[in-house]
Image (cartoon, rainbow, N blue to C red):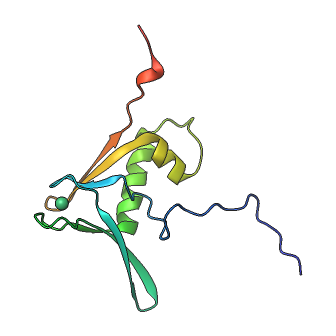
Amino acid sequence: MLQAADGESRRKPRNKHGALLYGLLHCSRCSKPMAHTSTQRDGRQYRYYVCRSKDCIRACVNATAFEASVVEQMESVAPRSLRGDVPRRIAALVDRVLYDGQENEVSIQMRASKERRRG
Ligand SMILES: [Zn+2]
């Protein structure tokens, strides 16, 4: 049996759930990194980012929807010349993402491109 490879072989995401913002997403209340977790219900997988800090409000946000909105915001500011798949672009452009679980507000901090210009 032959199985044709569809173009390039797909690389696996770094973490097992493919959490796009893992390591980037921080809770804006306590500024600690938010953990990624997933749960199964009715045969479907639901992913979340949660703040696990004891002294915090324990923000929890649906990962799928949250990632989509971050990607959308990034697309609107990212230079179009920068191609590549989304995880790579996120890694290249985004320094960190802050989530305020109380106000339900997201702020994306882009990497500063310091080397662009000199004098
Ligand atoms: Zn927190």
Residue at figure coordinates x 51%, y 46% from the top left: 89
Q: Where is residue 94 in the image (x, y as percent from the top left)?
A: 40, 43
Residue situated furthest front in the rendering? 54
Q: Where is residue 33 in the image (x, y as percent from the top left)?
A: 28, 57
Say left or right for 82 vs 116. Answer: right
Q: Image quadrant for the C terminus?
A: top left
Q: Nearer the viewer, residue 65 or 90?
A: 90
Q: Position of residue 105 (x, y in %)?
A: 21, 55
Residue at figure coordinates x 55%, y 62% from the top left: 13
Q: Where is residue 60 in the image (x, y as percent from the top left)?
A: 24, 69
Residue situated furthest bottom in the rendering? 42
Residue at figure coordinates x 10%, y 64% from the top left: 55
Q: Where does ligand 1 appear, by image quarter?
A: bottom left
Q: Nearer the viewer, residue 72 or 85?
A: 85
Say left or right for 30 vs 24. Answer: left
Residue at figure coordinates x 35%, y 73% from the top left: 37
Q: In which quarter of the image is residue 45?
A: bottom left
Above or below, comparing residue 40 to residue 57 in the picture: below
Above or below, comparing residue 49 to residue 21 in the picture: below
Q: Image quadrant for the N terminus?
A: bottom right
Residue situated furthest top in the rendering? 119
